[in-house]
Image (cartoon, coloured by chain):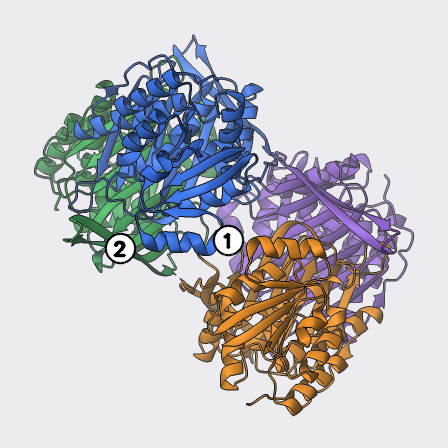
Chain colours: A green, B blue, C purple, D orange
């Protein structure tokens, strides 16, 4: 039985508590939040869980095996470092850290200490993403040529991170999970419509050596909510609409081929449309799957699907995007991924 | 009565013939296409119209007052120049020309000769775009903060122009028509999935001095057809979905405001959602409206809604986008718009 | 403070408990269910609420002021009668009773005892239905000419009541709430695809003296879920799509007028389509509004929106529909509504 | 080469002319319409076709082999009878005739004279209906349990026939084409909102001996256009949405099974949902397919898919529906289908 402590009981906190409460082989022992009103809320819903004001009380608690950190991004590094140094397994909310350097330091500590460091990219545990992974593993799509994601709504303006750091981690984690190739560079442009300099609309392109292109359209200022992703292979293409209830994934038997028309000295392209398949996808709650993956990886000394390597790749792209926005959209090369730090018990 | 000749009877030709046939105060006298099979087709549908193999026969025909040029973009300049030199009014298919320089030369000739030079940006004449213009003129949207357009489908790969030159003119003409501000710069990235080096997917951002940002997502390789544009003002926002039959335009009484929270030293943003209005839009055929505008502007010596100035602005953005793609997404400043050449009889 | 007991902790029970828990001026004292496993479930979610196996313990509890009955329809009458005789206010789940006679007896007892008898037609408390009522009260629709409802999905086959008694109460309660006229007759056809004689598909038409017609399409065997209602007035029409998140209600400025063409001796009809309005509707949880209405009506001696009169009208239509189905679709006249039993403290 | 004459050049006439013009092995020789303005319109679009004011000129023309009758329903019988008596093959617009008796007389004449008598139920020739037929022929649906059709919009009020005779023929022809069983009875209710007594809203149920039930919801007074049909088998179910561009047919791997729970002495039902398949359907123009079927059946002495037998079955249901509406929804037994009159050259 793994004893879990959760630091941060804000917007996402109650969902984490509820799902770790329901997960296998673990007990939620205590939750920390500096705001007494949040602890009152916790008490009302989960009277058996201890609430503490100071996260350090959880970090230092010898009965706690694993710590979930659900605070604002800028605090992830210090809290995770302390927890790892105290010998705790750590689950970080997305995005993993505020910089690549922070992520790499944490991964090194975790590796040295033989602890699990994981990032909560919940979307990887949805039935839809699992199904897409399955389709790609069966090579139904052929070579992946592009991924195009739109995640816009009229949403909360964050005051510490821009819209890419807020919304794109979902889509970037899916990109990393589905595509094996390592990205080469990014271009990004964004705009702020407030005076705090934090972009509320941004566009990000991720470029790959093979010619695969991935594009991300993120906004807090759209009157309509869109959560749509296209993944195009040269055999089939996927439309992933997360707002659909029963048809989240559509697989189009659609493709294009080109050939040289020697006579006219040009390239001709033919395309083909066929049937559409709408596979049934599992509707188990993703966050519960994530919680179970965290606990079972601690117990079995495995790497989770939403690993720190994947979390690091997401931060690398985000960090590069910030640099590109500052340089007015200029291409920024992504630093080579270091050897991943793998945890094994 | 204006006598019209049409050069080029390809994909779009029959639509032009049909609508100029139906337009007021004009007669379609002859149509030129170098392919005899196309002229046979013309003969079958419009037995009274003369078909000729050589466009020059139309350009030199003294009975022709105005010439519609619907050939491939790279031929626009030479044909239009010849026609203007022969004293003919000219309507060019979109995009106007293959370069800014060509467009400016044509505009100068037209101005000197007192002839009308117009570009067929048909979308400007749709009920939807007219309605959006009306809403903006009534200042219902407040200050426009962003425009975000997606125009993707599984479409014909052009062999002479890339996907931006093919699809974006529609959206760029709408941008120019709805927004008074002059764009400052562009960033664009694109990718080709064939060996001919012509981009089949491209992303374009147009930046404005005021902080307005416009973004264009164009693809020939999407399994689904999307033709959607968001226009966000600080008072209201518009969703324009061209694939909707009866609800092309939705006006959201939605906005966001920000204020400084001096205590917490940060910017806070509140948003508001209200009713949605779906105005009825005219369903008159846009191409017929365009043809009538061309003819009446010739007769009355006026500038059309789809003027050569607007056509030039579109080409300036396209030319800059090509340069940005070549420079791997780098920002490219758009050359200042020269004084527009205005035709008045 | 009103002490509430709830009898029946099945599918709907946890929702009732949660909302009465959150409602104003009341305390959920105890919950009865004959199945120990259900009481275990209650204990887990609501440790402070007492669970009892026998509903009679609640009915006889002198500290209980009001009883919510959420058991199967055939038990409503006996439980409600006992509760009323014990001086308790009663809230019945929909449909109110298994027959008109039962409903009338309960209403008489409640009237004699000065107790509140209410039916939980939750839909009346949704933002969408409230908005439609408001539009009708403002006479925006003109004279209502028809109501057409489809409520189909792949759903649980009930083993005691047919699909009309299961699904139509929602729509019939909306009909009664929005339309002032008393229905005259019904026709209904249904079919069972099992051997238990309980219809899983049924079609019901409710006829009104004025020419208003209401139609209800109910099925447990549709592959797609549809919850759509059209309400047509001679001035405007409403589309109510309960599955829409943000556009539940659309108001069409659409109508038709007819006139006699004396020359051709026939009636000609013109129709008109105008703008569409999508009003913002409240998203407060309907069940909470219902719970608050129940409690405040007890306290203030008022009749609730979802009154027993309305509940009786729904049962009258259902009872007539059963008779029509047995008579292979023949018209069945609805018995005149008796004088409603009104509770006032 | 079959010479065709067309009587009636109203709303549908130009479509018939255009498609017979394009069909194989036939020539449209002349078109009759009593309104000179319609003939002017014909002349403009099809200068080579002769226009005549009197249909008799076509019927008596010895050079005409086949006659298409596209006049109002009440005139079908007299015109078709005359044409058959003159030895012409006849294609009637839907519905075939104004009564069962008329249809049977025409079928007898056609049989005696060895002529083809066909009804233009265009929908049978769409890719969607052909695909559904193919799925049913392959027994993918299992036993068909229900068909539920909605065909509503804000449409032209006809002045001679009610909404069922106007709209339901489309859906009834699809029913007849897809379902082999002979219907047993109908129930129908309708309402008129004008003073001419012609129903503008009507609901029709068609009952079959096996327990199959078919339901038709038809209205000229809906603010939204719906053209949707559900076909439920015990293996799979189909959603046919005619307003969809690319997903007209969805096949749900969905079903329900029931079993007797002997212990609880009741019937239990389980349902199952699986993948959805969206087959690609042919987009050839249905009316052209129909025209080609007519011509090739004349030439080869075959029966067309849209045969007079099928047309008669549609009229039988319509006639019974009128009787049921007059009897306030009472069940009306459909007269047994007589032996069909089959044409063979």
Image: B107 above or below A259: above
Q: Position of residue A4 (x, y in %)?
A: 30, 39
Q: Position of residue D95 (x, y in %)?
A: 68, 71
Tell whether D4 sits left or right of A32: right
- Which corner quadrant of the image does residue C275 belong to? top right
Numbered disc in front, either 2 or 1: 2
Tell whether D30 sits left or right of C132: left
| Chain assignment, label 2 | A
Tell me the tag on residue A270: 2
Secondary structure at numbered mark 1: helix
Q: Nearer the viewer, residue C253 or D285?
A: D285
Q: Nearer the viewer, residue A6 or C143?
A: C143
Q: Is residue A297 visible?
A: yes
Q: Nearer the viewer, residue A86 or C61?
A: A86
Q: Position of residue D196 (x, y in %)?
A: 85, 58
* Residue indicated by mark 1: C41
Tell me the tag on residue D92: none
Image: A123 above or below A137: above
Q: Position of residue C22 (x, y in %)?
A: 60, 37
Image: A17 above or below D63: above
């Amino acid at each position: 039985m793994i004893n879990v402590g959760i630091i941060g009981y804000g917007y996402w906190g109650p969902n984490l508590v509820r799902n770790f409460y329901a997960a296998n082989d673990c007990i939620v022992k205590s939750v920390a939040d500096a705001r007494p009103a949040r602890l009152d809320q916790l008490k009302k819903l989960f009277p058996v869980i201890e609430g503490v004001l100071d996260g350090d009380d959880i970090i230092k608690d010898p009965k706690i095996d694993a710590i979930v950190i659900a605070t604002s991004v800028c605090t992830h590094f210090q809290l995770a470092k302390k927890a790892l140094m105290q010998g705790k397994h750590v689950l970080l909310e997305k995005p993993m850290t505020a910089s690549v350097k922070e992520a790499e330091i944490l991964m090194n500590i975790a590796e040295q200490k033989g602890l699990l460091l994981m990032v909560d990219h919940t979307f990887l545990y949805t039935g839809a993403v699992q199904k897409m992974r399955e389709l790609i593993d069966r090579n139904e799509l052929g070579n992946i040529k592009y991924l195009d994601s739109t995640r816009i709504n009229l949403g909360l303006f964050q005051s510490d991170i821009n819209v890419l750091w807020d919304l794109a981690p979902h889509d970037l984690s899916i990109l990393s999970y589905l595509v094996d190739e390592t990205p080469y560079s990014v271009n990004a442009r964004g705009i702020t419509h407030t005076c705090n300099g934090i972009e509320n609309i941004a566009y990000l392109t991720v470029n790959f050596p093979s010619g695969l292109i991935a594009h991300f359209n993120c906004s807090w200022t759209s009157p309509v909510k869109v959560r749509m992703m296209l993944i195009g292979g040269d055999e089939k293409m996927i439309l992933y609409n997360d707002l659909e209830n029963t048809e989240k994934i559509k697989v189009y038997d659609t493709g294009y081929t080109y050939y040289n028309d020697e006579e006219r000295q040009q390239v001709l392209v033919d395309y083909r449309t066929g049937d559409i398949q709408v596979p049934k996808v599992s509707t188990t709650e993703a966050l519960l799957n994530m919680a179970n993956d965290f606990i079972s990886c601690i117990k079995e000394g495995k790497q989770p699907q939403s690993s720190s390597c994947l979390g690091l790749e997401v931060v690398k792209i985000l960090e590069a995007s910030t640099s590109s926005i500052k340089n007015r959209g200029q291409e920024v090369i992504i630093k080579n991924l270091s050897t991943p730090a793998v945890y094994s018990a």
